[in-house]
Image (spheres, rainbow, N blue to C red):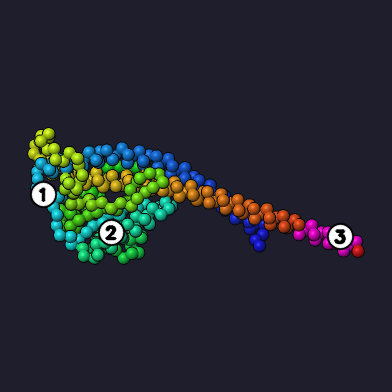
Amino acid sequence: MPSLKEIRGRIGSVRNIAQITRAMEMMSASRMKRAQDAILAARPYADELREALARVTAVIGEEVDPLLARRPMRRVGLIVMTSDRGLAGALDSNTVRAALRYIADLDGSPEVEVITIGRKGRDQIRRSGVPIAAHFTRFGDRPTFGDVTPVARLVTNDFLAGTYDEISVVYPGFISTLSQQPTVTRLLPVPRPEELGAEEAARTDEYLIEPSPAVVLSRLLPHYVAVDLYRAVLEANASEQSARMIAMRNATDNANELIGDLTLVYNKTRQATITREMIEIASGAEALGG
């Protein structure tokens, strides 16, 4: 049986851990609100941009831009978004598992290279043996469109140069504070109008496009790729902060429960110690009296 000093030390250690996890929970809660507001504000813009792109593409009626070109899939680039610090429950593991499942479904026919955003994903992908072409750290708790632009430019140039025939992105999609779903979406080539799912794609007679649909499309497509990637970053950021807040809350609750159990053990041990000492005193007194 552990001594009272050992139990007191363990209670103190667990209490310190509970204070740390509680502080991390409060920090994640404040960041979560900001991250959720950012993704909820970005979604309408991304959806409207998708519809505008579908309308312009429907007017042209053919793949006149190289970012729309479909090629035989010989090489595939996969962007995997995870966190840098972890402590977010199973969020990163689920995202990497979805990426590896996507690679396994390709059945080895195209060659796959991974571009990781976030240290946790890089470490897990490296252990799986999948080649990593490039790595980026996460863009902090307040990612901006300017932070994502270099990554979007890199993958766009790789696609245009023929380095990859298709580029997809895997990220934890934000559903609610309690729910995050690993999501795999194709970034390049840009989806066709029917794949974009825009309701107004067929109503092309209501729009006059200047200077020409081809020129507008050539400017719109790179911006669409960057916006789509930025949306994935915001989704991942909101999911990370939400998952970390829940994980730290569960850790705090578990620590408090452990403190209660240790306190009960401490009281029982203390009571047993006092009882044993009283028996020893009584036995000694009886021996002296005899």
Predominant SS along the magenta part? helix
- Answer with left or right where residue 223 lies relative to residue 63: right
Mark 1 and mark 2: span between their CA atoms? 27 Å
**In the structure shown, which secondary structural element does the residue marked by tag 2 occupy?**
helix
Residue 69 visible in the displayed image: yes
Type of the residue with mark 2: Tyr
- Which residue appears farthest toward the right when viewing the image? 290
Question: Which quadrant, please, contains the N terminus?
Answer: bottom right
Asked whether 196 or 97 is in front, the reply is: 196
237 above or below 265?
above
Q: Quadrant of residue 289?
A: bottom right
Q: Tell me which numbered mark, 1 or 2, is placed earlier along the sequence.
A: 1
Residue 214 x, y percent position in the rendering: 9, 43
Mark 3 and mark 2: span between their CA atoms? 78 Å
247 above or below 215?
below
Mark 1 and mark 3: span between their CA atoms? 102 Å
Read off the residue under disc 2: 102
Image disc number at residue 63: 1
Residue 57 x, y percent position in the rendering: 13, 44
Residue 119 visible in the displayed image: no
Labels 1 and 3 touching (C-beta < 8 A): no
Magenta highlight range = 276-289
Q: Tell me which numbered mark, 1 or 3, is placed earlier along the sequence.
A: 1
Read off the residue under disc 3: 285
Q: Is residue 209 magenta?
A: no
Residue at (21% x, 49% y) in the render: 153
Residue 225 x, y percent position in the rendering: 21, 47
